[in-house]
Image (cartoon, helix red, strand yellow):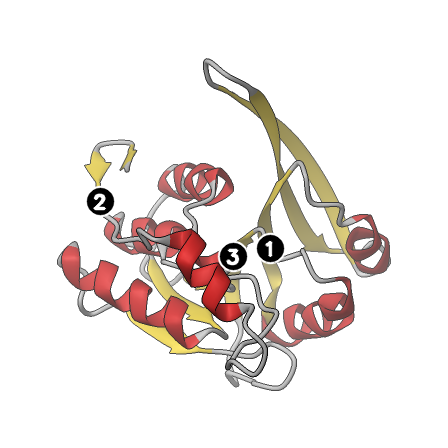
Amino acid sequence: IRVGEKTLKFLQVENMDAVIEELLKPGKKGEGERPFWAKIWESSVLLAHFLSSLPVKPDVSMLEIGCGMGVSGLFAAAFGHDTILTDINEDALAFARANAALNGLDESRIIRLDWGSDRLYRKFDLIFGSDVLYTDGSYGLLIQFLKTHLKPDGRVVLAVSGFISATTFFEEAEPIFKIKKKTYTLRSDARSHSIFLYTLEYR
């Protein structure tokens, strides 16, 4: 994947159908879970482009939530940003670490994080994520996590694919955050689809 003047390589699951079939077998660990982390979503690439445009400042700290295979966070690290990548899924973290090593970014901090229960005991200038709003039941937990970990003058940037309906999240977040939205349309020979880039800042 090329973003700006940098190109990174990413390992991904080759036999996705077989993985999904195995996960959906009764009694299997992770039964019923769809491995959303195992696909490189266009939203993560768009977010990587956004992060690449930010000036690099040594005193600016960044946190990625739901890093999946690490596309956005590793590009942020590659461009020199002080970034921690997090995910709750151990398989996703394994891929993110492998992709970090593949691109000479071995020193990247990649850790397991459940935003419903874990606390990092520090605050960040920028918290970002792509397509992390697909589970309605997690919205309240995520908003509380953001309030706990975002600096007073910090911001949250979320890339959301057009097929995800996250209206409830933004309704719940609106009393706390000022929300700005930009729409991007990606086109290919066969189809086009929208990705929304949301910026949240404290009121």
Q: In this figure, which residue is indicated by the disc labeled 3?
A: 36
Report the residue at 50% width, 83% height from top.
Answer: 120
Residue 165 placement (x, y as % from top left): 76, 45
Horizontally, residue 96 falls left or right of residue 43, namely left
Task: Report which residue position mark 1 lands on.
Answer: 156
Q: Amino acid at mark 1?
A: Val
**Mark 1 or mark 3, earlier in chain:** 3
Kindly identify the residue that appears in the image at 52 percent across and 85 percent down. Answer: 121
Q: Compared with residue 152, is residue 44 higher up or lower down, i.e. above or below?
A: above
Q: State left or right for residue 116 relative to residue 12.
A: right
Label ID, residue 9: none
Residue at the spot of label 2:
8
| CB within 8 Å, label 1 to label 3 | no
Residue 152 visible to an observer of this rendering:
yes
- In the depicted structure, whether residue 110 falls above or below residue 83: below
Disc 2, SS: loop
In which quadrant of the rendered image does the C terminus lie? bottom right
Question: Which dot, 1 or 3, sits closer to the camera?
Answer: 3
Q: Secondary structure at mark 3?
A: helix
Provide residue 200's location: percent of width, then percent of height.
67, 51
Q: Could you tell which of marks 1 and 2 lies nearer the N-terminus?
A: 2
The crowd level at tag 1 (other Cα within 10 Å; few <14, some 14-19, many 20+) is many
Crowding at dot 3, Cα within 10 Å, few <14 / some 14-19 / many 20+, comes out as few
Q: Quadrant of residue 38?
A: bottom left
